[in-house]
Amino acid sequence: MHEIELSHVDCADCPIRHRAVCSRCETDELEQLEEIKYYRTFEAGQTIAWTGDKLDFVATIVSGIATLSQTLEDGRTQMVGLLLPSDFMGRPGREMATYDVTATTEVVMCCFRRRPFEDLMRNTPHIAQRLLEMTLDELDAAREWMLLLGRKTAREKIASLLAIIARRDASLRHTGNSDVLEFDLPLTREAMADYLGLTLETVSRQVSALRREGVIELAGKRHVSVPDFDRLMLETGDDTDGGFLV
Amino acid sequence: MHEIELSHVDCADCPIRHRAVCSRCETDELEQLEEIKYYRTFEAGQTIAWTGDKLDFVATIVSGIATLSQTLEDGRTQMVGLLLPSDFMGRPGREMATYDVTATTEVVMCCFRRRPFEDLMRNTPHIAQRLLEMTLDELDAAREWMLLLGRKTAREKIASLLAIIARRDASLRHTGNSDVLEFDLPLTREAMADYLGLTLETVSRQVSALRREGVIELAGKRHVSVPDFDRLMLETGDDTDGGFLV
DNA sequence: CGCGCTTCTTGATCTTAATCAAGGTCCTCC
DNA sequence: GGAGGACCTTGATTAAGATCAAGAAGCGCG
């Protein structure tokens, strides 16, 4: 077990590193991963899997954005996860999808056939360990989201979502220190509503209110800039250090 | 790697099996676990850990009920997890508690010192694997809870909680097939409210409504019996197969 | 037994966000 | 450039649940 952090080694022709599964893995494990992997592209709006579908791969998101959502009998839906580049999807050891997975933009995924991936996981503790870490992080994020859904006001919910997307976006482009955060909302108002447990009208109203009060600026409907991130954070209701959701 | 399922072997003097960590582990691993484990009792109402506290153990609940909760700056609180006997608490690889952990009844925990447990985990893939499975289950439960918090009505929330407790209670006493489900609510109305993202008054009103309409019966304030589980399930808003939360 | 405490219930009122409804903006495609 | 459609905004009204308030039930304890 050598000591190089292989998260620093790019995974073959993948445009991003496999944060998901390669961290700390050994070179030959990396090669094994190479053998069972393939790429798939989904177009914007396409359903990647319905709840109950057979799912014979696990994957990391290379580019684009996908969502996980659940639906009640009568059609009310709740988004339960947002998959951004470098996020992992699928569950080793489970055949069926337990959520509806949808591409909201064009999505490129780096897939691993499930069975060989599971075998690999059994033989290479580092991968299991890494997956455990990631799952624990996701669990923390889910629980932070429970706090949002259960106790925050509509305004706080919107501010929280914007803060998360801003942070996440900034970290993806490695421009962590520019003063003015700017990004395109990857979600429609309806998708935001589904994520936040609101209606799309309420989302629209609260976004307008935040704009009116100068907390954010809008160029078009989707392009947001945040002149003062701390001001936005104040609106989230969180403790000042904030969380690391999604 | 022999094939006995050691989940069938009672763990020394533990009153329950360590569903959490012993499943499929080998005999000598079991012995190693024995060496680093100890018991702790917390009395009802006692705080096991505050967010940010140093936590030098992980543990399984042996008896009693504990809760995980998070709080916003201004005191609004949301429960994000309910720990019942055989549930696991703590996070390998993390020093600090990220939630407030509280004993709602007297709680006996079987603790493992964190460092040695982490070492053990590194050397025994089965334990890491088992922990991964459990964490994935918890993640599913958290996401199902997100659906509840974001989209269910007060009435549906109450019905869902009662259904979960009823199911969980029945499985704990191995009386899975008695017709009338009966159990004591392990939570005050306030704790139920914190779990469901409601106020205690709303909880009280909805419980009263379900009683008035014969969906449940109450003896005293805490003892519930469910004459017709399917009837209760109808009130949850879930698909008819239901979930397996918490 | 009755005091004091916590927990719970119920009622009256208020607030937030949902619902219903209409119209506006922007983009694509001919 | 204009038609069609998806997406978004805003207004009016309603409804679900929060809040405020009072009192009842249950319980440990002297």
Image (cartoon, coloured by chain):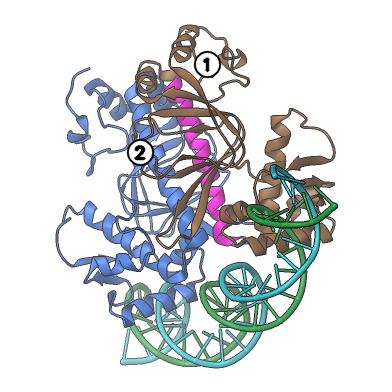
Chain colours: A blue, B brown, C green, D cyan
Do labels 1 and 2 touch, CB within 8 Å? no
Alpha carbons under labels 1 and 2: distance apart: 29 Å
Mark 1 surroundings: few (<14), some (14-19) or many (≥20) residues within 10 A: many
Examine the image and state in which quarter residue B103 appears.
top right
Which residue is label 1 attached to? Answer: B24
Residue B144 lies within the magenta run: yes
Quadrant of the rendered structure where residue C30 is? Answer: bottom left
At mark 2, the secondary structure is loop
- Residue A47 visible (yes or no): no
Task: Name which of mark 1 and mark 2 comes first in the sequence.
Answer: 1
Task: Find disc 2 in the rendering and name its residue.
Answer: B96
Residue B73 in the image: x percent, y percent?
Answer: 40, 60
Please tell me how many numbered marks the rendered image carries.
2
Q: Mark yes or no: residue B193 visible.
A: yes
Residue at 24% across, 66% down: A229
Label 1: state its secondary structure. loop
Start and end of the magenta stretch? B127-152
Depth check: give the residue in front, D10 or A71. Answer: D10
Q: Is residue A235 above or below residue B21?
A: below
- State the predominant SS element of the stretch in magenta: helix
Q: Position of residue B157 (x, y in %)?
A: 65, 56
In the rendered structure, the answer to whether residue B106 lies left or right of residue A1 reads right
Q: Which chain contains the residue that carries disc 1?
A: B
- Is residue B173 inside the magenta stretch? no
Q: Which residue is at 34% across, 23% downward?
A: B115
Q: Is residue B208 left or right of residue B76?
A: right
| Residue located 45% across and 64% down the image | A191
Residue B77, given in percent of the width and then of the height, sits at: 49, 56
Q: Amino acid at mark 2?
A: Met
Q: Residue at x 44, y 29 (%)?
A: B58
* Amino acid residing under circle 1: Arg
